[in-house]
Amino acid sequence: MESRCDNKSVGVILQNEADEYLLINRARFPYGWAAVAGHIDEHGNLEQTAVNEVYEEVGITLPVS
């Protein structure tokens, strides 16, 4: 079955204690520096999408409250 985009996404701004921000250099269009982000699609909800995308893109496990 073909996956379809739901046109809903989440972006995550990560900041450490030294006030540094984590950005990724996108390998696909649109190229450039960006915050971690992804479409909600099969993830379920905003919070779970944020947790999943951060882990998938940068390998950081976020706590879920």
Image (tube, helix red, strand yellow):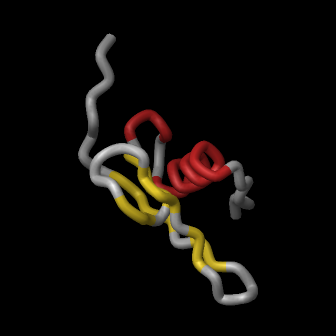
- In depth, the one of 52 and 28 nearer the eye is 28
Coordinates of residue 55 in the picture (x, y in percent): 65, 48
Instruction: Decide: is 23 above or below 50.
Output: below
Name the residue rendered at 64%, 82% in the picture: 20
Q: Is residue 3 above or below residue 60?
A: above
Q: Quadrant of residue 60?
A: bottom right
x, y (%) of residue 21?
Answer: 58, 77
Residue depicted at x 63% and y 52%: 58
Which residue occupies the foreground of this view, 46 or 10? 10
Instruction: Please name the residue shown 47% across and 49% down the image.
Output: 45
Left or right of 11 on screen, residue 59:
right
Where is residue 35? Give x, y as percent.
Answer: 47, 65
Picture residue at 60% right of the left edge, 54% below the top? 54
Quadrant of the image containing the N terminus: top left
Location of the C terminus (image quadrant)? bottom right
Where 13 sits versus 54, above or below? Answer: below
* Label tally: 0
Query: At which x and y percent is residue 50?
Result: 54, 55
